């Protein structure tokens, strides 16, 4: 039985993950951790019971501090908090080393989104340019999304074929933000959940790869997979790709 703590238990994803973990025969929800006083959860990490895995769904302002305390408790960590750029990933790698404990940082827990990122990376080798449009709900804390950043990295790794088309901007920012040389455009609107479109262009044709998350329940299978597998990994791992 794997003992699980959910950090950020008062948030939307924290509540959903807590409920999903509690329903699993091989997982035990031993505690929720959140500073929100209105929730019946632990507010002091020093009071938390022993656990094997902590699922971290907080916010970018506190996630690095939380990672340090989970590491000190010798807990494996599954991270769903966004905002992990190269510097933060490097800091996590320095903290966890080769493990254990291990840290699995997941830009997107949706299996469909993971496959979308994989397909975009494979297709990029065959097209001369690519751009990313990511769309999220209006309460998302950061932009661009971790999924868009990870996708841009996979496209860039395909080689110079997926180049950034140069175009003069009449208004600064009109061409989006360049992530690893790939233009990324972020949309924030009420009514959205999580969506991403990758458009690849070549001579006389374009290819569009799109994924839509219409319900946050889409993230649950990926979270459960991560909880069950994080102990098998070494040090810091990025994404679910290697687990599929």
Image: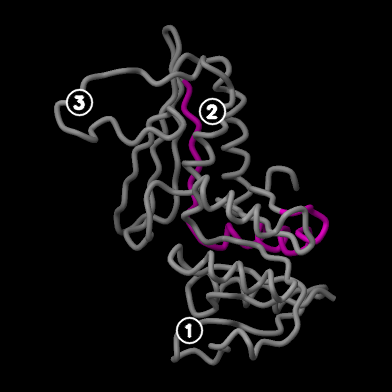
Give the structural element (helix, strand or loop) at label 2.
helix
> What numbered label is drawn on residue 169?
3
Pointer 3 with pointer 1, Cβ within 8 A: no
Q: Which comes sooner in the sequence, label 3 or label 1?
A: 1
Residue corresponding to mark 1: 35
Q: Residue at x 44, y 36 (%)?
A: 197
206 horizontally vs 46: left or right:
left
Q: Which residue is drawn at 57% across and 32% down?
A: 154
Q: Relative to 151, say whether 32 is above or below.
A: below
Residue extending furthest toward the top: 203
Q: How many labels does the image show?
A: 3
Pointer 2 with pointer 3, Cβ within 8 A: no
Q: Is residue 54 magenta?
A: no
Residue 68 placed where, x, y %?
61, 69
Give the structural element (helix, strand or loop) at label 3.
loop
Q: Give the range drawn in magenta.
A: 207-235
10 Å crowding of disc 2: few (<14), some (14-19), many (20+): many
10 Å crowding of disc 3: few (<14), some (14-19), many (20+): few
75 horizontally vs 204: left or right:
right
Q: Relative to 130, say whether 106 is above or below.
A: below
Q: Quadrant of residue 38?
A: bottom left
Residue 13 placed where, x, y %?
52, 69
| Front residue of 231 and 227 | 231
Residue corresponding to mark 2: 155
C-alpha gap between disc 2 and disc 1: 38 Å
Q: Quadrant of the C terminus?
A: top right
Q: Relative to 81, say whether 39 is above or below.
A: below
């Amino acid at each position: 039985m794997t003992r699980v703590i959910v950090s950020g238990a008062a948030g939307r994803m924290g509540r959903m993950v807590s409920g999903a973990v509690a329903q699993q025969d091989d997982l035990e929800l031993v505690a929720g951790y959140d500073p929100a006083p209105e929730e019946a959860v632990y507010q002091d990490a020093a009071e938390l019971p022993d656990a094997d895995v902590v699922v971290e769904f907080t916010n970018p302002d506190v996630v690095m501090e939380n990672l340090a305390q989970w590491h000190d408790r010798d807990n494996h960590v599954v991270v769903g908090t966004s905002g992990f750029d190269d510097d933060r990933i490097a800091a996590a790698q320095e903290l966890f080393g080769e493990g254990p404990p291990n840290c699995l940082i997941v830009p997107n827990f949706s299996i469909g989104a993971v496959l979308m990122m994989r397909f975009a990376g494979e297709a990029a080798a065959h097209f001369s340019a690519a751009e990313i449009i990511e769309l999220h709900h209006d309460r998302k804390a950061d932009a661009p999304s971790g999924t868009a950043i990870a996708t841009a990295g996979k496209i860039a790794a395909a080689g110079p074929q997926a180049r950034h088309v140069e175009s003069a901007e009449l208004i600064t920012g009109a061409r989006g933000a360049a992530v690893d040389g790939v233009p990324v455009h972020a949309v924030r609107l009420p009514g959205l959940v999580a969506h991403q479109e990758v458009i690849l262009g070549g001579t006389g044709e374009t290819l569009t790869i799109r994924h839509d998350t219409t319900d946050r329940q889409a993230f649950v299978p990926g979270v459960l997979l991560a909880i069950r597998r994080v102990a098998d990994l070494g040090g810091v791992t990025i994404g679910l790709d290697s687990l599929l």
